[in-house]
Image (cartoon, helix red, strand yellow):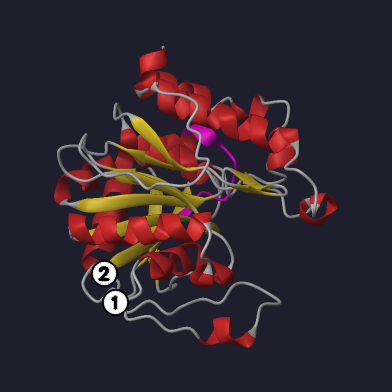
Amino acid sequence: MAVMLAQKETLPQWLTRHVGPNLLEDKEKPGDFYNWFGKYLKQLKPSAIVVISAHWQGQGKNGIFVDTSEKPELIYDFYNFPQRYYEQTWDHQGSPLVAEKVIGLLNQAGIKATGQQYGNDHGVWVPLKRAMQSNKDIPIVEVSTFGHEDMAMHTKMGEALAPLRDENIVIIGSGSAVHNLRGLWSFAGKPTPSFVVDFDKQMEKLACTQIGDARKQEACLLDRHPHFRECHPTAEHLVPFHVALGAAGDDEAIKLLEDYFCTLGWGSYGFGLSKDVTLPKYNNQTLSFSRDEL
C-alpha cells in the first residue's frame, strides 16, 4: 500500500502501499510502518477515512464507483494464500453519509460518480486492519480509480476530493510505487533491479521537492519514464498516487517508507503532516530528497 496521509491545519493525506494478506503478520519494515501508521491514525481521530483503491476500477472514460455500504463486506481478492487469510474478519464500518459526500464532490467536478454496495477489497482492509487491529469508530469509504490510465484525470479526481480534508476526513491512495508481478520471480534471490529503484526515486523526487501544479504536471509525465512499463505493466497501482497529489495541493510531502522486493516498490508518503510529528524509524532508512535541496 502506498499511503498518502494529507494534513493541512486539518488532516493529512497519504499515499500508501498495500500487499497481499501476509502483511497482517509482517514483522519487518512494512509491518513496522503500519504499526506507526495505525497509532497515528488513532491519534488524529478523523471522522472518516476515504481510500482510493488500485483494486477497483470505474467504468468508461469518466466513471467512478463509491462504496455506500454501512457494513462493508471483506473481499478476499487474492489467490494461493493459506486458508487463515480467507477467514479474516474485522470490526470496521462504512458510512453511506460520507459516501454521498464523495459522490457529490465528484459530480460537482464533472466526474460521473455512482454508489455501489461493493465492500472493501484487500487494497483497503488488509493494510488498515494491519494498522488498526480494531476499528469500531472510524468509518471507511472505498472509492475506485478510473477504468483507464489517464493520469491528469486522476489528479483532477484528487482535487475534487480535497475539501473532505477540511471536514476531518483522511484521504488515502492505496497502490504501489512499483508493481510488476509478471517479473517478480525472475528476480527472486537477486538484488532489486535498478529500474525499480530508478522509477521509485523519480517519484520521490517529484513528490518531495515540488508542490502544487508543478508537482502534478511532472507526475503526469511518469508514463514517459524509460522504465515505466517495466515498473507498471498496467498502471492501476500507480494512479492512486496521482489522486493523492491532486488532493494534496500545495502541501509538502515526506517519504515515510522505502522498501523493495524484486519488482515491487513500497514507497509511501505523507502530505501536509504537522511539523512536530514523530516519524517512523527504520534501520538503514534513506530519504533522498527534501524541498530544502531545491
Quadrant in the picture for residue 111? top left
User: Furthest residue to the front?
Assistant: 283
**What residue is shown with label 2?**
96
Left or right of 119? Residue 29 is: right
Estimate the x, y position of residue 123 in percent, counting from the top left. Answer: 50, 62
**What residue is shown with label 1?**
70
Q: Residues within 10 Å of mark 2 (few under 14, many from 20)?
A: some
| Label of residue 141 in the image | none
Labels 1 and 2: the sequence-earlier one: 1
What type is the residue that disc 2 sits on?
Pro
Residue 143: tell me if it is visible. no
Q: Give the residue displayed 68% in from the left and 46% down from the top.
A: 234
Residue 104 on the magenta span: no
- Secondary structure, mark 2, is helix
Circles 1 and 2: CB atoms closer than 8 Å: yes
Q: Give the residue displayed 28% in from the left and 73% down from the top.
A: 135
On-image quarter of the C terminus: top left
Residue 55: tell me if it is visible. yes
Q: Is residue 42 above or below residue 76?
A: above
Residue 151 on the magenta span: yes
Q: Residues within 10 Å of mark 1 (few under 14, many from 20)?
A: some
Left or right of 32? Residue 151 is: right
Estimate the x, y position of residue 25 in percent, counting from the top left. Answer: 52, 72
Q: Give the residue displayed 17% in from the left and 52% down from the top.
A: 168
Q: Tell me which segment is drawn in magenta.
A: 144-152
CA distance separating discs 1 and 2: 6 Å
- Secondary structure, mark 1, is loop
Q: Is residue 64 above or below residue 229?
A: below
State the residue in front, 204 or 140. 204
Left or right of 281? Residue 169 is: left
